[in-house]
Image (cartoon, rainbow, N blue to C red):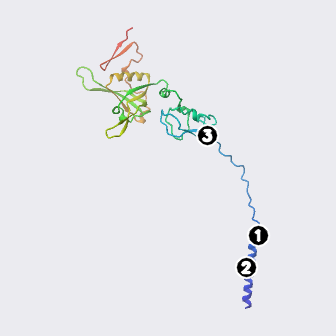
Amino acid sequence: MVASRMIIAGVAVIAAGGAGFVAKNMSAPPAQQVIQDAGPQQPAIAMSEVLVLSKDLPMGAAIEDHLEWQSWPSDATNENYVTKDKEPEALAQLKGSVARLAMYDGEPLRRSKLIGSGLSFMSAILPSGKRAIATQIAADTSAGGFILPNDYVDVIMTRRAEGEGAAGFITETILKNIRVLAIDQAIEESEDGKRTKIGETATLELTPQQAEIITVAQQMADRLTLALRSVTDTQETGMDEADYLVSGNGRRGTVRLIKSGVVSEEGARK
């Protein structure tokens, strides 16, 4: 009995000591956390309002309301961007402009890609020293209607053979690697009810000499065909052309005569 009482008394003493320790910790104030100095804080990123496109725009499309201000990091902008701090009225001023080149949604606007309000689109995109010539075409003479602006083509002339005993046609490529500036599109409904786009006139970018060649060819030819070139072939230069159709090579005082599709040359009368 004495031993059991001593055990019970020991357990009671231990329990009382544990309770006292818990009570002491609960009443003690919380330990203070030491906050280390992290040093000087990094400044916030400087932002600028940049004018960007809110819609994809093809070449020649009006800007209208397809512009918006967007926040960009100032370090990511350059002097070609239109910013609100430099041109606060740009959003309203540029609505009447036209896209000189294709532009895309989210792209920062550059004035070099715009044509001002009231200016001719075609003369603005035409490089110095070049001429724009409109050539009548049809779907069956323009790669099935797949030729689009900025494509490159060869111009093929087809005409009937002339002279006694002549039969058939004469076909030759009169111009090569010519850039298409524009091609008109008209909506035409087919027999199955589908609406398709058919181009009737292509505007080509030509040198003055090439403009003369195609002008003569339009009078001579029964048909002019545009042959679409691969994009990998557009860098070729120095290709042969039908220079014989016009006076050239430094010759002067000659007149080119076209009669019944036959070209002849005579000395000019004084």
Q: At numbered mark 3, what does the secondary structure look like: helix, strand or loop?
A: strand
From what the image shows, is residue 33 above or below residue 83? below
Which label was assigned to residue 15? 2
Residue at image location 75% in from the left, 74% down from the top: 21
Q: Which residue is mark 3?
A: 49
Closest to the observer: 265 or 127?
A: 127
Q: At numbered mark 2, what does the secondary structure look like: helix, strand or loop?
A: helix
Quarter location, residue 219: top left
Mark 1 touching mark 2, by CB under 8 A? no
- Please tell me which of labels 1 and 2 falls first in the chain: 2
Residue 11 position in % (x across, y down): 72, 82
Quarter location, residue 93: top right
Q: Nearer the viewer, mark 3 or mark 2?
A: 3
Q: Which residue is mark 1?
A: 27
Mark 3 touching mark 1, by CB under 8 A? no
- Please tell me which of labels 3 and 1 falls first in the chain: 1
Label 1: how many Cα within 10 Å (few below 14, some 14–19, many 20+) = few
Question: Which image quarter holds the N terminus?
Answer: bottom right
Residue at image location 62% in from the left, 40% down from the top: 48
Residue at image location 43% in from the left, 31% down from the top: 182
Specify whether 55 is left or right of 225: right
- Please tell me which of labels 3 and 2 falls first in the chain: 2
Is there any visible trace of residue 6 in the rendered image?
yes
Residue at image location 37% in from the left, 14% down from the top: 255
Quarter location, residue 150: top left
Mark 3 touching mark 2, by CB under 8 A? no
Residue 26 position in % (x across, y down): 74, 70
